[in-house]
Image (cartoon, helix red, strand yellow):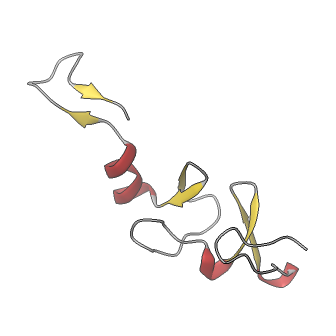
Amino acid sequence: MPKCPKCQKEVYFAEKVTSLGKDWHRPCLKCEKCNKTLSAGSHAEHDGKPYCHKPCYSALFGPTGFGRGGTESHTYK
């Protein structure tokens, strides 16, 4: 029986949601930053942890601007 990566309890077939190559309990699949419940496939992943696309993932790991624009005005984390 697979274990949920969040709570480490067994995930039964009737309650499982598969995302990031793992089986989760539906209430356990939440954004690491804002704690919003996510649906399978509608979120981003960083270091094996789920994040909602906006605003959390883009704010934490997206490009950051500097300068006055141009080709070197963004850095990526």
Instruction: Name the residue rendered at 46%, 61% in the picture.
Output: 52
Q: In terms of depth relative to the viewer, which is nearer, 40 or 24?
A: 24
Exactly how many numbered labels are in the figure? 0
Residue 42: image location, x then y, percent: 56, 59
- Relative placement, left or right, of 61 versus 18 is left
Q: Is residue 32 left or right of residue 61?
A: right
Residue 20 in the image, given as x and y percentages of width and height: 68, 55
Residue 61 lies, in percent from the top left, at 39, 44
Specify the quadrant that holds the N terminus: bottom right
| Viewer-nearest residue: 18 or 61 | 61
Determine whether 66 is above or below 59 in the image.
above
Q: Is residue 2 above or below residue 53?
A: below
- Nearest the eye: 41 or 19: 19
Q: In which quadrant of the rendered image does the C terminus lie? A: top left
Residue drawn at x 53%, y 71% as measured from the top left: 30
Residue at 29%, 28% (x, y): give it. 75
- Residue found at the very far left of the displayed protein: 68
**Is 15 positioned to the left or the right of 74 in the image?**
right
Residue drawn at the location 34% of the way across and 58% of the way down? 55
